[in-house]
Image (tube, rainbow, N blue to C red):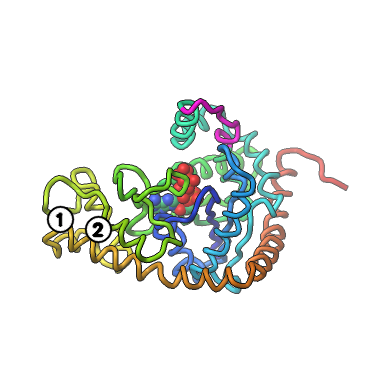
Amino acid sequence: MKRIFSGIKPTGHLTLGNYLGALRRWVEVDQHRADALFSVVDLHALTVEHDPARVRRLSRQAAALMLAAGLDPERCTVFVQSHVDAHTRLSYLLECTATDGELRRMIQYKEKGTRARAAGQSVRLSLLTYPVLMAADILAHGTDEVPVGEDQTQHVELTRDLALRFNQRYGHVFTVPRATHPPVAARVMDLQDPTSKMGKSHEPGNGIVYLLDDPDTTRKKVMRAVTDSGSEVRYDREESPGVTNLLEILAACSGGDPAELAGAYRSYGDLKRDTADAVVELLRPVRERHAELASDGGGYVDEVLRAGAERASALARPRVDAAYAAVGLLPAG
Ligand code: AQP
């Protein structure tokens, strides 16, 4: 059976981008067709300045939202990355496989590093090395497929390179994984700045729809979305990024094709109204189930995470032990 791994980092409240780019497919497709593991990758949230209480709160919230969205612990494994030591244990071996040059080429390192320096902050070493930890998250579980939004493509490519290099040097230990993306909305853009990705760690504003926004707030954000200077509804990311983003969101919500949908609209107002309705209806059950889960004080979520960590640890340990042996380290005991 195919193995699937993917994760969400608790750097902010989950957004419509996380839902359309990743979580929804995990729920609707991936957990039904493979042995799937989904993780709150909390260690990745420590690569930039963070508030410990907030990371703790957001980790619980992310796990609750993953379950509220429909991940079923009877079908898949849901766990918190830091509960499974195999990830950091393997990460070091992969740091001994990766090169300084290839990590410095990572787009997210360049962008976030530049932003931190511009704000007068120091850049944590982990911002440079975390793609290696991400590779360890994936490789420790013998993953075949990594369902992610488009922004993670470069990191999955690095993971493939490291797996191939390690196997070539030390013998076959790792499955070489590949990234998969949703057919539409693989990169949901900020509604106020449709040339930038909608990101949960970005400054909150009207451009970001959070899964837990109430319906009125969601509707207002979509109705205020920046469109383009013309008036024609066109599906063209270069020339018409705002409208194209709305078409992709509507297509993802309604199961349609964004280019065909463009032909059905005469005005931006109608497009915004239908998109707002579709998003509100798509997110309604997630918000409702999240409220139910929150009302039991988090006991169910904690139990799912405990069992998930136990299973993920058992799954990863033999492969990570094999990697330790392959590079020439003496077995303990
Ligand atoms: N806008 C998006 N459109 C489509 N997919 C997206 N994803 C994130 N944003 C979009 C996908 O969601 C999964 C989890 O994302 P993440 O936690 O790794 O990153 P984030 O939500 O983008 O959070 P940050 O902290 O704001 O990240 P940076 O600053 O690194 O962009 C992934 O599969 C991701 O592709």
Tell me how far mark 2 sits from mark 1, CA to CA: 9 Å
> Which tag, 2 or 1, sits closer to the chain's start?
1
Q: In this view, does 120 lie above or below 332?
A: above
Residue at image x 55%, y 57%? 5
Name the residue type under label 2: Leu
Residue 93, horizontal then vertical, whole percent: 67, 39
Q: Residues within 10 Å of mark 2 (few under 14, many from 20)?
A: many
Q: Measuring 43% from the left and 55% from the top, which residue is drawn there? A: 15
Q: Which mark is residue 247?
A: 2
Element type at marker 2?
Answer: helix
From where the camera sits, is residue 156 visible? no
Residue 247 spot, x, y in % from top left: 24, 58
The residue segment tinted magenta is 119-129
Pointers 2 and 1 in contact (C-beta within 8 Å): yes
Give the left or right position of residue 323, taking residue 136 as reference.
right
* Residue 313 versus residue 288 in the image, above or below: above
Q: Quadrant of the N terminus?
A: bottom right
Determine which residue is flagged by label 1.
233
Amino acid beneath label 1 = Val
Please tell me how many numbered marks the rendered image carries: 2
The residue positioned 53% from the left and 64% from the top of the image is: 66
Give the camera-side residue of 147 and 79: 79
Which class describes the residues within 10 Å of circle 1: few (<14), some (14-19), or many (20+)? many
